[in-house]
């Protein structure tokens, strides 16, 4: 067996991964398009569409690698997949920052709300 020829298990795994990557790519593109319906949502929608396109391009290069067995196609597939993961990492960091700011905003609002109404209760019997 030649060292450059992928094993059948490797071939099966990549084939299954190609289908999964296409599904995830379509899902991200649709989700990004729905986010883009609002101006604020476009902040997340455009990167979602970009990452969906990158993962679909990666799947296409993996398919090319399986049919031609060229290392260049494998390099391109891994490069596109790394771009997908980079975009996802940036989106996660942005989401965490927005979540933390949201929690801080709730704490500030509750602190203001509770101090505003503190001691203004009149009870009559």
Image: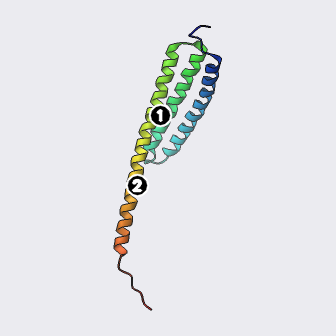
**In this view of the protein, which residue sits in the foreground, 119 or 91?**
119
**In this view of the protein, which residue sits in the foreground, 42 or 9?**
9
Q: Is residue 100 found left or right of 2 in the rendered image?
A: left
Q: Residue at x 40, y 55 (%)?
A: 102
Mark 1 or mark 2, which has the lower sequence index? 1
Q: Give the position of the N terminus as an image quadrant.
A: top right
Q: What separation in Å lies between label 1 and label 2 (alpha carbons)?
A: 26 Å
Q: Nearer the viewer, mark 1 or mark 2?
A: 2
Q: Position of residue 47 (x, y in %)?
A: 45, 37
Q: Residue at x 39, y 82 (%)?
A: 121
Q: Give the position of the C terminus as an image quadrant.
A: bottom left
Mark 2 Cα shell of 10 Å, populated few (<14), some (14-19), many (≥20): few
**In this view of the protein, which residue sits in the foreground, 118 or 67?**
118
Q: Are marks 1 and 2 in contact (CB under 8 Å)?
A: no
Residue 92 in which image quadrant: top left
Q: Which mark is residue 70?
A: none
Q: Is residue 87 found left or right of 10 in the rendered image?
A: left
Mark 1 Cα shell of 10 Å, populated few (<14), some (14-19), many (≥20): some
**In the orientation shown, which residue stands out farthest toward the bottom?**
125
Q: Which residue is mark 2?
A: 102
| Numbered label tally | 2
Q: Position of residue 107 (x, y in %)?
A: 38, 61
In this picture the colour scheme is rainbow
Q: Residue at x 51, y 31 (%)?
A: 53
Q: Which mark is residue 50?
A: 1
Q: Is residue 114 above or below residue 104?
A: below
Q: Is residue 84 found left or right of 59 in the rendered image?
A: left
Q: Position of residue 69 (x, y in %)?
A: 57, 13
Q: Residue at x 48, y 20 (%)?
A: 76
């Amino acid at each position: 067996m030649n060292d450059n020829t992928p094993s059948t298990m490797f071939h099966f795994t990549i084939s299954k991964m190609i289908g999964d990557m296409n599904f995830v790519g379509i899902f991200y593109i649709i989700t990004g398009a729905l986010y883009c319906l609002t101006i604020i949502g476009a902040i997340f929608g455009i990167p979602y569409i970009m990452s969906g396109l990158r993962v679909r391009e990666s799947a296409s290069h993996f398919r090319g690698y399986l049919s031609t067995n060229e290392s260049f196609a494998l390099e391109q597939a891994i490069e596109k997949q790394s771009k997908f993961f980079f975009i996802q990492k940036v989106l996660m960091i942005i989401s965490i920052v927005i979540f933390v700011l949201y929690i801080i905003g709730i704490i500030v609002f509750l602190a203001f709300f509770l101090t505003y109404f503190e001691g203004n209760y009149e009870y009559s019997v």
